[in-house]
Image (cartoon, rainbow, N blue to C red):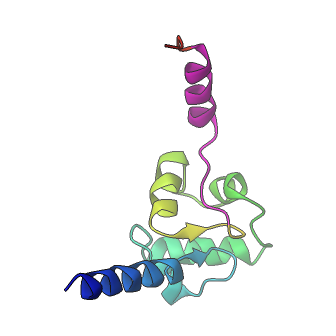
Amino acid sequence: MFKKILAATAMLFAVASFAAVDVNKGTVADLDGIKGVGPAMSKRILDARKEGEFKDWPDLMQRVKGVKEKNAEKLSAEGLTVNGQSFGGGAPAKAKEAKAAKAPKP
């Protein structure tokens, strides 16, 4: 029984690793498969991609209407990447690091 559960868990992780879609390489169907990306956003992504590949997440957020930091975090969590990179955040992540550095050490 334990081996079956372990095998099923391994299969889920394998499927999840293949679920990543790069915004520069994904087709309409690939992009639509990402939760939070619908037909309208897929079209906006592909239209912006015609001008050139996205360099990074800030480039994507600047060129595609409807993709801002909060949405980028959600899309990244669902498997969307830009040049193989998941969304790193930016200012909030730096703020958290600064708070952690200022926190008193036990």
Left or right: 24 as drawn, with respect to 13: right
Q: In this view of the protein, can residue 93 be seen by the observer? A: yes
Q: How many marks?
A: 0
Answer above or below: position of 54 versus 72: below
Query: x and y percent of residue 73 in the render?
Result: 50, 53
Closer to the camera, 55 or 64? 55
Closer to the camera, 73 or 14? 14
Magenta-colored span: 85-102
Closer to the camera, 88 or 38? 88
| Residue at x 59%, y 13% (from the top left corner) | 102
| Residue at x 61%, y 83% (from the top left corner) | 26
| Residue at x 47%, y 47% (from the top left corner) | 70
Answer above or below: position of 66 versus 34: above
Figure quadrant of the N terminus:
bottom left
Q: Tell me if residue 74 is in the magenta stretch.
A: no
Q: Tell me if residue 91 is in the magenta stretch.
A: yes
Query: x and y percent of residue 67 in the render?
Result: 54, 56
